[in-house]
Image (tube, rainbow, N blue to C red):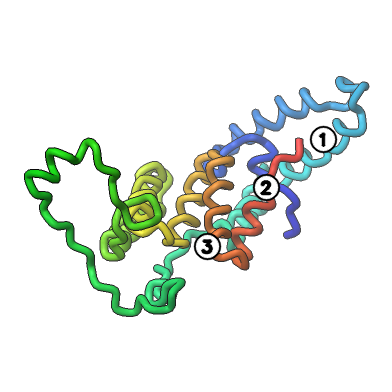
């Protein structure tokens, strides 16, 4: 199925929208962009109407909509990036030991308001793969039901906080944002996947179909 732009984004509805919501969105947009009502922008309006009709014909048909939703780029990722964890950019992270924080001295506590806060070098918290995996797994379980998509987003965000290079967590966070209709936020997270792996074909696909043409 060669799709230039995401059908849900074209109609301005979330992928979890009901069939009634899809029909309502199509009626409103078809009135707004009908060529007869936009004589000064006739060519643009005609192109927009073709796009709307194509999206509506797929999403208004339950069978075609299921086929559209089954595309691989719309599926949650379950692998945990073990290959990346076994070897970081320096090539020497196979048995990375956990980092333990030392209790600050009285002098350090007194001076803490004037000292620059230290981090792991990425501007976030110390990397903790175990905690990242715990939240990732929770996110996966919540991503199985629409009613828990918001909670799933929170878990994937937590996973990223403990492992800022957790590519699958970024992808799943982007996917949850996409499914709830937060298309721009979704695109941002898919772009972060590409920053970690520029050859990721599914992330490339999502960034492409979520672009703004109109």
Compared with 146, 37 (above or below) is above
Disc with the residue nearer the chain's start (1 vs 2):
2
- Residue 39, percent from left and from top: 92, 22
Q: Residues within 10 Å of mark 1 (few under 14, many from 20)?
A: many
- Residue 26, percent from left and from top: 70, 32
Q: Which mark is residue 196?
A: 3
- Residue 210, percent from left and from top: 65, 46
Q: Quadrant of residue 78?
A: bottom left
Residue 47 is left or right of residue 136, and the answer is right
Foreground mark, 3 or 1, reads: 3
The residue to which callout 2 is attached is 6
Residue in the image at 50% along x and 44% along y: 177
Q: Nearer the viewer, residue 43 or 82?
A: 82
Contact (CB < 8 A) between labels 3 and 1? no
The residue to which callout 1 is attached is 49
Secondary structure found at label 3: helix
Foreground mark, 3 or 2, reads: 3
Contact (CB < 8 A) between labels 1 and 2? no
Secondary structure found at label 1: helix
């Amino acid at each position: 199925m060669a799709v230039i732009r995401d059908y849900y984004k074209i109609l301005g509805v979330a992928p979890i929208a009901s069939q009634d919501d899809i029909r309502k969105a199509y009626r409103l947009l078809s009135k707004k962009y009908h060529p007869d009502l936009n004589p000064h922008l006739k060519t643009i309006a005609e192109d927009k109407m073709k796009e709307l009709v194509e999206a509506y014909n797929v999403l208004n048909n339950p069978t075609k909509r299921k086929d559209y939703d089954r595309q691989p780029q719309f599926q949650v990722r379950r692998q945990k990036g073990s290959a990346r964890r076994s070897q970081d950019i320096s090539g020497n992270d196979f048995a990375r030991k956990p980092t333990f924080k030392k209790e600050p001295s009285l002098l350090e506590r007194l001076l803490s308001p004037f000292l620059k806060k230290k981090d792991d070098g990425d501007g976030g918290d110390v990397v903790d793969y175990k905690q990242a995996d715990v939240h990732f797994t929770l996110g996966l379980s919540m991503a199985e039901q629409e009613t828990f998509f918001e909670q799933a987003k929170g878990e994937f965000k937590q996973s990223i906080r403990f492992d800022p290079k957790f590519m699958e967590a970024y992808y799943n966070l982007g996917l949850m944002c996409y499914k709830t209709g937060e298309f721009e936020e979704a695109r941002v997270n898919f772009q972060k996947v590409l920053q970690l792996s520029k050859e990721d074909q599914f992330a490339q696909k999502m960034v492409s179909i979520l672009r703004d043409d109109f």
